[in-house]
Image: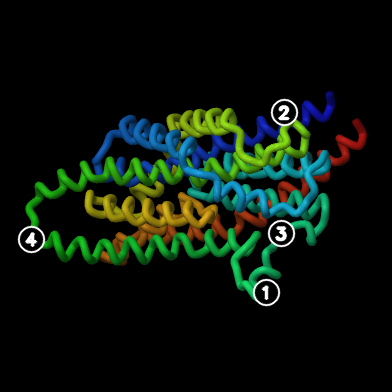
Amino acid sequence: MFWDMIVLLVLAAAFVFLLTDGLHDASSVVATIIACGAATPVQAILLAAGSGLVGVLFGGSAVAHTIVNLIDVPAGRSLLDILLAALMAAVSWNLLTWRLGLPSSSTHALIGGLIGAVWASAGFEHVAWGVSALVGDGHRLDGVVKVFVGLIISPLIGFIAAGLLQWVMEFFLRNSSYSVNCWLKRGQWVVAAVLAFNHGSNDTQKVLGLVSLTLLAANWTDQEQIPLWSQVVGGLIMFAGTIFGGWSIIKTLGRKIFRLRPLHSFDSLVSSGGSLLIANILGAPISTTHLVAGTVIGVGAAGDYRMVNWQIGREMVLAWLITIPASALMAALIQQLLSMFINWA
């Protein structure tokens, strides 16, 4: 009975994390389309929420397997308090940065939470760092190394892709009339839907993989695939988080970095959506917030770098740098407290 309660707490923490992810990362999906006037806040949120829900149900499971493989701990009761500590730390960090309006990464928070909880409970060697795979004969990306590479290069790729696309589009549209903005605004609805679909797939898989691992550890199932019921519940919770929205983060990405016009927003969405689609195919869990922020700065720098608020960019980078160690430390402390409580109980 006691361990059944622990399992329920882990599942609850997982779905609360999804809710905060909807508040946090889903805000970045709609920030530019709102800022340039292509859609009202209500229209953009409903579009992102609906497309994200479809992405959860039909977006595959490659990212989920990547997250699960970060933990080199046998499925059992000891794994449950690790997952609970990791998720509690990630939720706490998400709520803190959401309250402050910082576009921090939910993915970074979750990865940091997993590293800290596993390290504190089982030891350094039980984190699947992936270094041996990197230096071996195969020279493949795996484990934490694979995740870090994806998290680090995704905003850089978004920055470069968006900047190049902005230059190309400005060249071809240099003699266009003002009416082209109407077509750009309409096109953003399609591109934003694609971005939201891939965001729903990428971000939700990270948590649903842990849900599947929890059920295995508790012997509630003997199958490794993600249960359909968890996909439905997870999709609905992400939908709810997107509906509530993170308006402070939307303002930061959509208005405080660079004054976005329809072309800027269109190029940012195309670059973000394409990059996230590739990440889903490769099974790389990347940060949607980082990616979108990189593309927004990229389109701004392509036009006139002096018009970009680089101070906001520096604040984002600082938040990104401290998220993993901060959430790892929080998870380690929470895991030790949980371990003491479980031993006492």
Mark 1, other Cα within 10 Å: few <14 / some 14–19 / many ≥20: few
User: Looking at the image, which residue is at 76% across and 44% down?
Assistant: 82
Q: Which of the two discs, 3 and 1, sits closer to the camera?
A: 1
Q: Quadrant of residue 11?
A: top right
> Foreground mark, 2 or 4?
2
The extreme front residue here reads: 223
Q: Of the two numbered discs 3 and 1 on the same chain, state the one appearing first in sequence.
A: 3
Give the CA distance from mark 2 to mark 4. Answer: 60 Å
Q: Mark 1 points at which residue?
A: 136
Q: Is mark 3 on a helix, strand or loop?
A: loop
Quick check: marks 4 and 3 in contact, CB under 8 Å? no
Q: Position of residue 221 (x, y in %)?
A: 72, 33
Q: Could you say which disc has been placed on residue 8 in the image?
A: 2
Answer few, some or many: residues within 10 Å of disc 3's Cα (few below 14, many 20 plus, some between 14 and 19).
many
Type of amino acid at the residue the image marks with label 1: Gly
First in sequence, mark 1 or 2: give its number: 2
**Residue 182: assigned label:** none
Amino acid on which the number 3 mark rests in the picture = Ala
Whichever of callouts 1 and 4 sits on the residue coming sooner in the sequence is: 1
Give coordinates of residue 282: x percent, y percent: 50, 57
Cα gap from disc 1 to disc 4, whole angstroms? 54 Å
Q: Provide the residue designation for mark 3.
A: 128
Q: Earlier in the sequence, mark 4 or mark 3?
A: 3
* Residue hosting label 4: 175
Name the image quarter holding the N terminus: top right
